[in-house]
Image (spheres, helix red, strand yellow):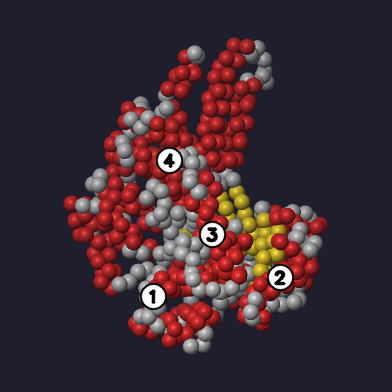
Amino acid sequence: SNPALLSMASDRSKRLREALPDVLRAVQAGSNEVFHGDCGATWNGLRRGLTDLKKDPEKLDSMELPDENRIDAVWEFMLRLMVGSPKYARQIMDAIAMLLSSKRWADGLLRADDIRRLSLWKLSASAEPSPVKLAAAILKLGVLVDDLLPVAALESGTNFVEELEKMLEGKELAALEDSALGVAWRKAQMLGAQSPISREGSLSEPRSSEDLGQLVEANQAQAASIEAAGRTDRRPVCRKDVVDSLLDLTEEALDIGARFLEPMMSGYAGETNVATSAKAKVQEFRHRQANLQAQLVVMGPCQAGKTSLTYSLVGFAALPPDFPSMVTTRWVHTPNLAVPRLKMPEALWQLLRSWAAKLPATAEEEAEDKPLPMQGECVEGIEAVSETLASVHRIVHKGRAQGVIKSQELEALSRPAMCVSVEVAFSALANLEEAYTDTGTLSIIDLPSPDGDALWEAQDLQQLCKRALQEADGVLVVVDASKYKVPRWMGNLLREAFLQDRLLRREDAWIVANRIDQLADFFCKDGVTSVCRRVKQRQYRDYRDVVVSEDRVIPTAAHLSLLAIYGKDKVRDSLNSAILSKLDREPWFAQICSFLFGVQWASKVKDMEHSKWRQSMRELQLLGQVTGPLAS
C-alpha cells in the first residue's frame, strides 16, 4: 500500500482546508463581487469539503486551521450566497445542519453579522432539511428571535411561525412569544389574516369526483405521472453527488500519478506532466458541470396569451399586466424558494427611470402607478413582483406609444442582458428529485409581445428574437388558436431562424396553440377533444416547416389554468357570507364561478367548503392543459 494514497484517503478534512482560502478571498473581495465571477465554483469546492466530513463529523472540531477567522469567513460566505444566489438554498441548509452539530462551528454562526440573511422563512416548508427545524436549532443556541426572524417572516404566511412554535419549549418558546415576530403573529391570528404570498403545491390535491370530460381525465393522468416522478423512492445519494465523487477520486488518482511521474521528467522547457494536464481537463469538466444552463424561450404575438402561459408554467399566482410585455423577463427556477424575487440590472433600471420621468401622467395615474424599486433593490413577494412587472411594461409601452421613447432608444432592450429576472420555484417541478432540479440553472425566457411593427422596428424585433434563440435550448411559439390567420412577421421570422440561420433545431420547437376556449365548439359535448384534434392539424399545416410533427403542437387554454392558480391562492377558507361579499365583485372570481357553475353561480358557491373549492380549481387548471404535456 502506498503511504501517499493512504494519507490522502484518511484525511477527510483535506478538501475543506483546500477550499477555505478561496472562501476567504471571496469574502474579502466585497459584498457585491462575491456573487460575480466564480462564486459557484467556490461554493462547490466548499460543499464537497463539507460532504467529505459527513462520514467523520468529529473532524470539524479537531481539524487544524490557521485561525478561527476561516470559520467566520465560511459563515459570511454562506450568508451572502443565500442572499445573492438562493438557488443554492437547499445545499446551504444541508451544510448549516451539519455545521451546527459542531460547537466550534456553531460558535462561528453566533459571531456572524445579520444572520437574518439566512431568510429561512422564504423557503418552502417541505424542503429538506426543514428550514423550520434549522430555525429552531439556531434559536436554541441562544440567538434572539428578532435577530433571526423579522416580522416580515409573516409575509410567507403564518405556517412557518406555527410550525416553529411546535418545535420550541421553555425559554425559547417564551422568547418567541415575547418577540416582535410573536406579537405580530398573535395579531395576525386574531384577525384571521394570512398574507397572500404563501402558496401550496398545485398537483397535490386528490382527484375530484366531478366529471369535466375526457380531457380532465387525460390531464389528471399526465399530472399524476409528473407527481409520481417525485414520489419515487430516492436513492441515498443523488446522481450529481455520484459524479462529484467520481471526479474527486479521479483528481486524487491523477495527483498521485503526477508525483510518480515527476522523477521521469527530463526538465526541458515546455515539458508537461501528463497527469497534471489530465487533471486540468477533469477540473474544466467539473466547472462546466457546476454551471449547466438550460433556457426555454417563449415567444409569440401580442394578445396570444403568452404571459398567461408563462405564469401558469412557473406557477406564479398573479394576473397578467394590462399592458403587453415590452421587456424580456427571465424566470429562473429556484428550488424551495417560497417567496418570488425580482431583480434587474442597473443599466435597465437607469433606462426605465429616465423614460418614466419623461412620461406625462394625470394625478389619478400617479396614484395608481407603482414606482420602480430603488436602485439595486430586490423586490420580493408575488404581489410586489407582479406590480413591478406591470410598471416596467407600462413605462415602455406608454413611452413608445406617446413618442417619448424613440425607436433607436428601444434597440437597447434587444440585448440579452437588458432583462428583468424573477427567481421562483417552478410549481411543475416541485415534486421532482433534487438530482433533476439541483444541478445547473433552468430558465424560461418570456420575450416581449410585439404588435407587428406598430411599436417595434422590424430589425430590432428580429435582433431580439435571434439573440434569444441563439442561447436557447428550446422554444415555445405561442399562437392564438382562435385566429385562423398566422401573423406574417412571426412566420417569416421563425422560418428564417430555423431554416436559414439554423439557430435552433426543429426538434427543439413546439407550437403552443393557445386560447382554444375561445372557439365556439369548445363547450359542446366532446368539444374539447374535437377542438384539440382540429387545432393540432391546422397549426401543424401552418408550421410544418418549423416543427417536426403534429405531436409538437400543444393546444392550451392558459387563461383558465392561470385563473385556477390565482383562485386557489386567493381563496383560503370556506366561502361564507363574509368572504363571498369581498369576492363576488372581483372579475377574476366571477369568471371562475360562471365558467364552472353557470350564471347562477352565486347561490352554488355560497358556503362552499374550502376543500371543494380547491378541487374545482384543480379541475379548472387541468382543463387549461398547461399541467399536462406542456409542463412535462
Question: In this rendering, would 521 be left or right of 584?
Answer: right
Q: Nearer the viewer, mark 4 or mark 2?
A: 2
Q: Amino acid at mark 2?
A: Arg
Instruction: Report crowding for label 4: few under 14, some 14 to 19, many 20 or more residues within 10 A (C-alpha).
Output: few
How far apart marks 3 and 4 lie (CA) works out to 48 Å
CA–CA distance in space, label 1 to label 3: 24 Å
Question: Looking at the picture, which amino acid does disc 4 mark?
Answer: Gln
- Pick whichever of labels 3 and 4 is earlier in the sequence: 4
- What label does residue 533 carry, if any? 2
Mark 1 or mark 3, earlier in chain: 3
Task: Pick the residue in front: 361 or 509.
Answer: 509
Location of mark 1 (residue): 609
Label 1 to label 2: alpha-carbon separation: 36 Å
The image's mark for residue 224 is: 3
- The mark that comes first in sequence, 1 or 2, is 2
Residue 299: % across, % down: 66, 65
Write down the quadrant of residue 534 in the picture: bottom right
Q: Considering only vertical position in the picture, is 9 above or below 565?
A: above
In this rendering, position of residue 128 left or right of residue 106: right
Q: Is residue 187 visible?
A: yes
Residue lying at 35% horizontally and 39% vertically, measured from the top left: 99
